[in-house]
Image (cartoon, helix red, strand yellow):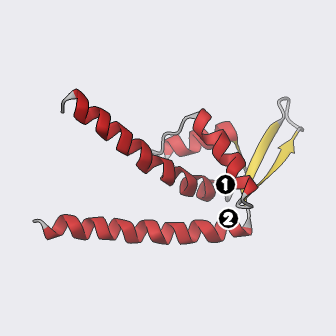
Amino acid sequence: MGDDADAALGTHLQELRRGSVVLASLLACRTPRYGYALLTTLAEAGIATEANTLYPLLRRLEGQGLLTSTWRTEEPRPRKYYETTALGTETAERLHAEWLALGAGYTDLRKADE
């Protein structure tokens, strides 16, 4: 691939990942997680995310009522833990179903040309 193709691919991959981080965060936060642990969990799942992308996303999802947060101060370093709400769980399930349907559609489109 040339530089132009690499740049275009990079842009599209970033757009694709941006939407998937919402679903991944809602799923991962079914168990309470603080920001850095969530970054690690997502990376281990193959969903690399930058901190400067994740933290604003967590605040936005909390503002939408999809996550709740609590400060835990019993450890030497206070940490803000995020957990998926009932609405967040319902939203994650619907987003996951849509993700699966889209994947099936892409597969069908690829098979149509074979």
Q: Nearer the viewer, mark 1 or mark 2?
A: 2
The quarter of the displayed image where residue 5 is located: top left
Residue 111's tag is none
User: What amino acid is labelled 1 in the image?
Assistant: Cys
Q: Position of residue 56 (x, y in %)?
A: 66, 42
- 29 or 7, nearer to the observer: 7
Q: Position of residue 29 (x, y in %)?
A: 66, 54
Q: Quadrant of the N terminus?
A: top left
Q: Secondary structure at mark 2?
A: helix
User: What amino acid is labelled 2 in the image?
Assistant: Gly
Q: Secondary structure at mark 1?
A: loop
Label 1 vs 2, first from the N-terminus: 1
Up/down of 66 relative to 48, above or below = below
Q: Is residue 30 left or right of residue 74?
A: left
Is disc 1 in contact with disc 2, using a CB cutoff of under 8 Å?
yes
Q: Quadrant of the C terminus?
A: bottom left
State the residue position of label 1.
29
Q: Position of residue 60 (x, y in %)?
A: 69, 50
Q: Residue furthest left?
A: 114
Q: Position of residue 108 (x, y in %)?
A: 24, 71
State the residue position of label 2.
88
Up/down of 101 relative to 80, above or below = below
Q: Is residue 43 left or right of residue 100?
A: right
